[in-house]
Image: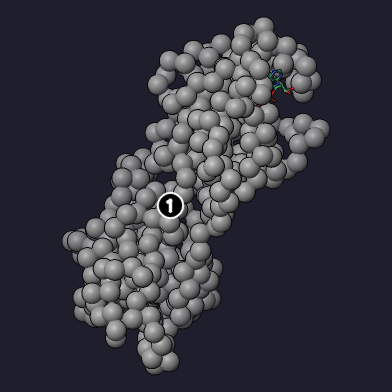
């Protein structure tokens, strides 16, 4: 049980607005059921990130929950609106366009699962992002089959379309490999701590080393508007399949085990012992890849160019669409001074200054009816448009301009 913060609960509960929220400086409270969530820093921007405490009206106790996900940095002020009683939408005042909308999940599926695992109160942060992302592509297959070669070809031909999810690994770098480009090379103890902190989407022990995809590795690619490619083993693919990340799963097979061995040996990056271990593991991976039901597509990498053409075809890259340039989704430009209200699935941000009130399009509407994803990654699918409350009236809220 934690101590009551200086921001006294009675005061909070008496002064809540119609959305169950009340703010004071950089702190805001939102009540859902019996629980009041106190979110924010002590004073303005003096703290590094927004903290969370929970007051349970039924027991009269304060709790400091386990907070998962990257936390939003502190800010000048906050607004909050509860959505579906399972998450709280937070609008940060005076923040940059890519950092102003956050979600604190308090009872989503992910949070409920984590509460069971941790046996205590858990909440999870997820940053809001405009628009949708194309499904990430998970590519698996035995070591030496040519995954990396195919991915390099794709990234070279379509640099603005694809981005690589840079995994973490505890294995030593090969001579041409660069930290942060091919992998984030890391100490086992450091990676184990980060795993415990919930920073990874998936991880597995592969050929004797730890490998893992951090949540950030996928989200930073998607934030740029690119489609994320993951090169991970079958165990990792299984974990991603069970996660909230909707992806396309592709398994690459060699033409034969003999050819696989030839490729691994001719690559010349592994010791004899490692080659034997990788070949041994390849048998298991081939079985699982072909019969586990994880994979949407199986490709045979016999002739490299033919396999690459098949890969492009199944990713829809064999026609005019392939030429489409992607651009990063825009952020949301909010004035520092605003108030927030809610109407059905729409959050109305009233750009409150007298000057802005006079300007056209003085209301910003966040449509939250089609949100996707969420903790431990971003919450995507925010639709944002501006309307003029004077000429469009509230009817304009239902008609994006
Ligand atoms: N179709 C092919 N025919 C012949 N050689 C190939 C073919 N595809 C890839 N190779 C070669 O096989 C070797 C292994 O390929 P690559 O490194 O891409 O495998 P990988 O699946 O990424 O392996 P790992 O999982 O160990 O990272 C490389 O030397 C590559 O040039
Ligand atoms: N489960 C995960 N597997 C991963 C990840 N990154 C790479 N891998 C797989 O490991 C083997 C070996 O890779 P190598 O670079 O040492 O040859 C290969 O099958 C990769 O697909 C990861 O983040 N998670």
> Considering only vertical position in the picture, is 204 above or below 38?
above
**Which quadrant would residue 317 be assigned to in this image?**
top right
Vertical comparison of 101 with 237: above or below: below
- Quarter of the C terminus within the rendering: bottom left
**Compared with residue 215, is residue 92 higher up or lower down, i.e. above or below?**
below
Please tell me which residue is depicted at 75% across the width and 34% down the height of the picture: 173
Placement of the N terminus among the 4 image quadrants: bottom left
Residue 37 shown left or right of residue 331 in the figure: left
Work out whether residue 189 can be spotted: no
Q: Quadrant of residue 341?
A: bottom left
Residue 202's x, y, as percent?
50, 36
- Residue 379 place in picture, x, y as percent: 41, 54
Q: Residue at coordinates 56% horizontally, 25% vertically from top-left?
A: 310
Q: Is residue 262 left or right of residue 91?
A: right
As rendered, which of 58 and 392 lies closer to the eye? 392
- Residue that badge 1 annotates: 132
Q: Residue 208, how many percent across, how many down?
A: 63, 23
Return the residue nearer the eye: 322 or 57.
Answer: 322
Q: Name which residue lies at 72% across and 16% down.
A: 263
Whether residue 101 is situated above or below residue 389 in the rendered picture: above
Q: Position of residue 363 (x, y in %)?
A: 35, 78
In which quarter of the view is residue 40 placed?
bottom left
């Amino acid at each position: 049980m934690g101590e009551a913060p200086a921001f006294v609960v009675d005061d909070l509960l008496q002064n809540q607005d119609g959305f169950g929220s009340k703010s004071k400086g950089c702190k805001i409270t939102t009540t859902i059921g019996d629980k009041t969530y106190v979110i924010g820093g002590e004073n303005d921007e003096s703290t590094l990130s927004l903290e969370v405490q929970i007051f349970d009206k039924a027991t009269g106790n304060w709790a400091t929950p386990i907070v998962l996900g990257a936390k939003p940095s502190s800010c000048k002020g906050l607004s909050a609106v509860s959505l579906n009683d399972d998450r709280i939408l937070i609008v940060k005042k005076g923040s940059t366009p890519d950092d102003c909308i956050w979600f604190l999940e308090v009872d989503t599926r992910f949070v409920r699962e984590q509460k069971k695992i941790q046996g205590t109160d858990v909440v999870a942060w997820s940053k809001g992002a405009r628009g949708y992302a194309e499904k990430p592509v998970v590519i698996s297959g035995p070591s030496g089959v040519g995954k990396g070669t195919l991915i390099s070809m794709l990234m070279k031909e379509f640099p603005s379309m694809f981005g690589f999810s840079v995994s973490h690994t505890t294995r030593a770098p090969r001579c041409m490999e660069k930290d942060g480009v091919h992998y984030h090379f890391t100490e086992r103890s450091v990676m184990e701590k980060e795993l415990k902190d919930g920073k990874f989407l998936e991880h597995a022990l592969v050929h004797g080393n730890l490998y893992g995809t951090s949540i950030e590795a996928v989200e930073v690619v998607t934030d740029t508007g690119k489609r994320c490619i993951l090169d991970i083993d079958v165990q990792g693919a299984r974990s991603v399949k069970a996660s909230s990340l909707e992806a396309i799963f592709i398994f690459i097979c060699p033409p034969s085990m003999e050819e696989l061995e030839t490729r691994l040996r001719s690559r010349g990056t592994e010791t004899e012992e490692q080659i034997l271990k990788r070949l041994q593991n390849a048998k298991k991976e081939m079985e699982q890849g072909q019969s586990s039901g994880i994979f949407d597509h199986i490709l045979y990498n016999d002739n490299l160019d033919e396999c690459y053409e098949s890969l492009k075809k199944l990713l829809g890259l064999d026609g005019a669409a392939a030429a489409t340039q992607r651009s990063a989704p825009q952020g949301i430009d909010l004035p520092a001074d605003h108030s927030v209200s809610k109407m059905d699935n729409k959050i109305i941000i009233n750009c409150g200054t007298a000057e802005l009130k006079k300007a056209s399009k003085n209301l910003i509407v966040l449509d939250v009816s089609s949100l996707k994803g969420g903790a431990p990654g971003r919450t995507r699918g925010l639709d944002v448009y501006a309307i003029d409350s004077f000429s469009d009236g509230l009817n304009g809220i239902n008609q994006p301009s």
